[in-house]
Amino acid sequence: MSKIQDVANLAGVSVATVSRVLNNSPKVSAKTRLNVINAVKELNYEPNLLGRNLRRSETKMILVLLQNISNPFYSKVIKGMEDYGHKNNYNVMFCNTDSNIEREKKYLDLLKNKLVDGVIFMAPEIDIYTMNTIGKNYPLIQCCEYLENSQISRVSIDNEKAAFEAVEYLIKNGHKKIGLINSKKPHQSSKDREKGYRRALYENNIQIDESLIRYESYGFKGGINAIKSFVDEKKVPDALFTVSDIIAIGAIKALKSFNFNVPDDISIIGFDNLSISSMYDPILSTVSQPRYELGNKAMELIIEIIKNKKNIIKNVVLNHQLLIRESTKKE
């Protein structure tokens, strides 16, 4: 592999001159620049971009921390991040944390040691004090999921409002016995969606029945288990709001196994508008998040913080959309 000294020898210049050409310095004559470029091509020389960027105190690398990269929710968010990053000459590295705080801290060490320029958290598990302390000194933002009251910029939707609209739609279509399947994990989005559920019932003068609320794993089995418990306790609601599409689809599968018809016997609204929601039978009513735009905006925000070299605290809220399809009965 050719070295920068080889380029300098072939071009008949110093190593410093080669560096100036590679860095597009104006302090090089056109003839010398051409000689260096020709030498680079002839030797197939590839400069050490990481080393060069580190000397400039930048790596052009953004680290994105995900709980589980196999989660289908992340696909469009990741695409939005990559597209904006590459357009602005930033590379993006995605890492699984498996909701492990120690793993999160190890990844954050990359930021502290200036091996990445910034970090985007998708679902932080670290405590708010650690988050705020790091965010004051390094480029750090939150996307989709966030810690409430943190002094860190974030990009998300209004989860409470979205849930309120979904549940109120069910109420306006004649449903009174409305259940909720929520996640066991105390993420802010799940808390906010439950707030929206409760507020919709309260503002429409429907008494909240705690026996119609289930906390399950955030996945397909969570929906199945919730329906089984409703059936076992003879507390099956006439409508359901779930905090994710995957939970909703699990619930529909379980309801079918107990000979319930969706939507004739029970209406269901999910959350996220994953691709599978439009492929299932019945096609799932859901709250659509602008996932690509969330990723795009998050990358725009982290790059803005990096370039400004200061902590900008912004709470960016993007619009959601309630999509009514086949899993909800209309009055």
Image: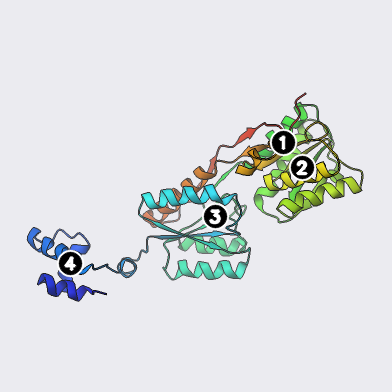
59 vs 80, nearest the viewer: 80
Q: Is residue 271 visible?
A: yes
Inspect the image, locate mark 3, and give the three-letter code of the amino acid beneath it: Gln
The crowd level at tag 4 (other Cα within 10 Å; few <14, some 14-19, many 20+) is: few
Element type at mark 1: loop
Q: Are marks 1 and 2 in contact (CB under 8 Å)?
A: yes
Residue 273 x, y percent position in the rendering = 62, 41
Residue behind mark 1: 282
The crowd level at tag 2 (other Cα within 10 Å; few <14, some 14-19, many 20+) is: many
Residue 45 x, y percent position in the rendering = 24, 68
Q: Are marks 4 and 1 in contact (CB under 8 Å)?
A: no
| Residue found at x 13% / y 75% | 9
Task: Point out the tag, 4 or 2, that comes first from the N-terminus.
Answer: 4
Task: Point out the tag, 3 or 2, that comes first from the N-terminus.
Answer: 3
Residue behind mark 3: 151
Q: For marks 3 and 2, give the CA distance.
A: 40 Å
Element type at mark 4: helix
Which label was assigned to residue 42?
4
Inspect the image, locate mark 1, and give the three-letter code of the amino acid beneath it: Pro
Q: For marks 1 and 2, give the CA distance.
A: 9 Å
Q: Are marks 3 and 4 in contact (CB under 8 Å)?
A: no
186 vs 132, nearest the viewer: 186
Task: Point out the tag, 1 or 3, that comes first from the N-terminus.
Answer: 3
Element type at mark 3: loop
Inspect the image, locate mark 2, and give the three-letter code of the amino acid beneath it: Ile
Q: Quadrant of residue 39?
A: bottom left
Q: Is residue 14 visible?
A: no
Residue behind mark 2: 252
Inspect the image, locate mark 4, and give the three-letter code of the amino acid beneath it: Glu
Residue 278 x, y percent position in the rendering = 64, 38
Q: For marks 4 and 1, give the CA distance.
A: 62 Å
